[in-house]
Amino acid sequence: MDSSAGLNPATLSALIALVRKHTGIAMTERKSVLLEGRLRPRMQALAIGSYQAYLDKVEQDRSEIPHFIDLVTTNDTLFFRTPQVWDYVEQEFLPQWWQAHPGGCLKVWSAAASSGEELYSMAMLCEEFQAAHPGFTYRIHATDISRQVLEQARAGDYAGRSVERILSTHPDWVKKYFKPGSKGLQVVDALKRNVELAQHNLLAPLKPHKKFDLVFLRNVLIYFDQEHQEAVLQQVRHSMTPDSRLILGESESIRGLNLPYHCERPMVYTMDKRATP
Ligand SMILES: C[S@@+](CC[C@H](N)C(=O)[O-])C[C@H]1O[C@@H](n2cnc3c(N)ncnc32)[C@H](O)[C@@H]1O
């Protein structure tokens, strides 16, 4: 296997183009070492001796594409990541939504959900809100392009950094919403009851078409170039109503993009009222 020799510039460019084609992620040549490190174990498992041969396989064998996507996506996430977002959802968004929709069912989309920490954070807030507001119901639709992380989200079994963090920030909720799992702590079935998980590429229209009251689109736009950021946000707005809220990651914004969104506060957006969905 010549993978130790590193990626030659032509193969690197072709791999970067393939990443962009299948995920929208914009990699630069500077990510060469990262790409090598991620692809090498898969190449070894398949006994493929060069990056060019692996590139040929992804191009010719459709069944390899999901593995390729799993390898090239970055899936870092945490429970209650960016606490001020969760304070906003708990203290402002949920009470205001309930006041405007008494007896309604809140619809949430965790787009780019990764291994599920974000969607189960939301489920915990909703369960708490439900206990205090009988009649409140919710559904969480969670999607990601990577099948591997969706399997982890489906299992809801967490160890390592995710668990350490929630143990220190929300010890009472750990007792209430987790049980011992085969890896570490596993979310209880009550948290999964109102959740559906599906594979979805944010560059494509969401199928079936749905509208959501709250959309989490956090820490994924940073991987795209401006063209794809705009394309994703154009798709997402079809899933919003004039009253929906869109939440981006803390290092993301729509500044400089030609899009009909209005920034309500840092990280929180509504659709521009003049825009037609
Ligand atoms: C860094 S994680 C963010 C997880 C979570 N939203 C958070 O903020 O903690 C980015 C996720 O975006 C997903 N992703 C990347 N490109 C995507 C695309 N084109 N469509 C859908 N998901 C994508 C990756 O698979 C990854 O799980």
Image (cartoon, helix red, strand yellow):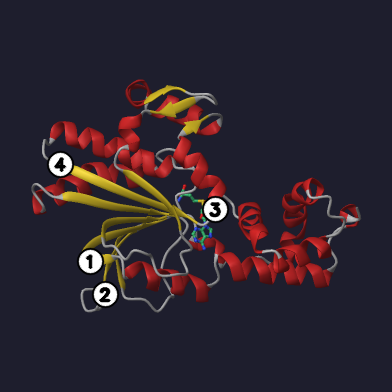
Quick check: 115 left or right of 63?
left
Q: Residue type at mark 4?
A: Phe
| Label 4 residue near ligand 1, CB within 8 Å | no
Give how far apart the Cα atoms at labels 2 and 3 are. Answer: 28 Å
Q: Secondary structure at mark 2?
A: loop
Query: Which image quarter: residue 61?
Result: bottom right
Q: Relative to 13, is 152 above or below?
A: above
Q: Secondary structure at mark 3?
A: loop
Which residue is tagged 1?
A: 241
Residue at image coords 73%, 54% = 34
x%, y% of residue 149? Answer: 53, 46
Give how far apart the Cα atoms at labels 3 and 1 are. Answer: 27 Å
- Crowding near the residue tagged with mark 2, few <14, some 14–19, many ≥20 C-alpha atoms within 10 Å: some
N-terminal of the two: label 4 or label 1?
Answer: 4
Q: Secondary structure at mark 4?
A: loop
N-terminal of the two: label 4 or label 2?
Answer: 4
Which residue is tagged 2?
A: 277
Give how far apart the Cα atoms at labels 4 and 2 are. Answer: 27 Å
Quick check: 272 left or right of 149?
left
Quick check: 156 left or right of 63?
left
Query: Which image quarter: residue 217?
Result: bottom left
Q: Are marks 1 and 2 in contact (CB under 8 Å)?
A: yes
Q: Residue type at mark 1?
A: Thr
x%, y% of residue 155? Answer: 47, 35
Which residue is tagged 4?
A: 136
Mark drawn on residue 146: 3
Q: Relative to 153, is 244 above or below?
A: below
- Crowding near the residue tagged with mark 1, few <14, some 14–19, many ≥20 C-alpha atoms within 10 Å: some
N-terminal of the two: label 3 or label 1?
Answer: 3
